[in-house]
Amino acid sequence: MAGRGDIIEILATRSDLDVNVTANWHDHFTALHLSAVQGHDDAVRALLAAPGIDLNAPNASGNTPIMELALTTYLRTEKHSCIFRRLMNVPGVDLKVRSPDGRGLLSICAAIGSLPLVDDLLSKFGADVNERGAQIKARA
């Protein structure tokens, strides 16, 4: 039985397919947004290899795939953290992207308590430890 990645790999080789088309029913997510957020690493890998993939396509909320993945707080699971790391290592992915409320990837990863991703952003990608972002309000 073929997996999602196998199917996407076959579809992505078609010259008449737009791999960046957005889903009107899901905040205008691209296939890369959906695959990342839903934790489908095989599909993410296939999409990253697709010619013409827009790594930084914004959805209706203005979030790129890596930002949407960070904001979903799924980074607490290993499979989502692996996808986040995969996206971080792809040349052309904007790691200085900001959420609509002004937060960067470093502040979001720190807020959800993902020490390994914070460490990667600081040590491997030179994230600014003094980045300014929106204040995160404590729960009352």
Image (cartoon, helix red, strand yellow):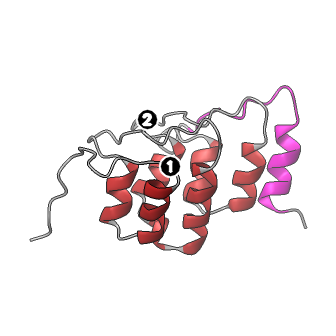
Q: Nearer the viewer, mark 1 or mark 2?
A: 1
Amino acid tagged 1: Phe
Position of residue 110 measured from the top left corner of the image (x, y, whole percent): 33, 63
Which residue lies at the image location 64% right of the left edge and 55% below the top edge? 86
- Image: magenta residue range: 3-23
Quarter of the C terminus within the rendering = bottom left
Which residue lies at the image location 35% right of the left edge and 71% below the top edge? 113
Vertical relation: 49 (above or below) 71: above
Along the line of sight, the residue nearer the viewer: 94 or 138: 94
Q: Residues within 10 Å of mark 2 (few under 14, many from 20)?
A: some
Position of residue 37 measured from the top left corner of the image (x, y, whole percent): 54, 57
Which residue lies at the image location 38% right of the left edge and 60% below the top edge? 109
Residue under label 1, please give it: 125
Vertical relation: 11 (above or below) 84: above
Which residue lies at the image location 91% right of the left edge and 67% below the top edge? 1
| Picture mark count | 2
Write down the quadrant of residue 93 in the picture: top right
Drawn side of residue 105 relative to residue 14, left or right:
left
Residue situated furthest top in the rendering? 16
Vertical relation: 79 (above or below) 67: below
Amino acid tagged 2: Ala
Q: Is mark 2 on a helix, strand or loop?
A: loop
Drawn side of residue 20 relative to residue 101, left or right:
right
Lower sequence index among marks 1 and 2: 2
Q: What element carries label 1?
A: loop
Position of residue 89 measured from the top left corner of the image (x, y, whole percent): 62, 50
Write down the quadrant of residue 36 in the picture: bottom right
Task: Using the image, tell me which numbered label, if any, was put on residue 60.
Answer: 2
- Magenta region includes residue 49: no
Task: Using the image, tell me which numbered label, if any, was put on residue 10.
Answer: none
User: Disc 1 and disc 2: Cα gap in Å?
Assistant: 27 Å
CB atoms at circles 1 and 2 under 8 Å apart? no
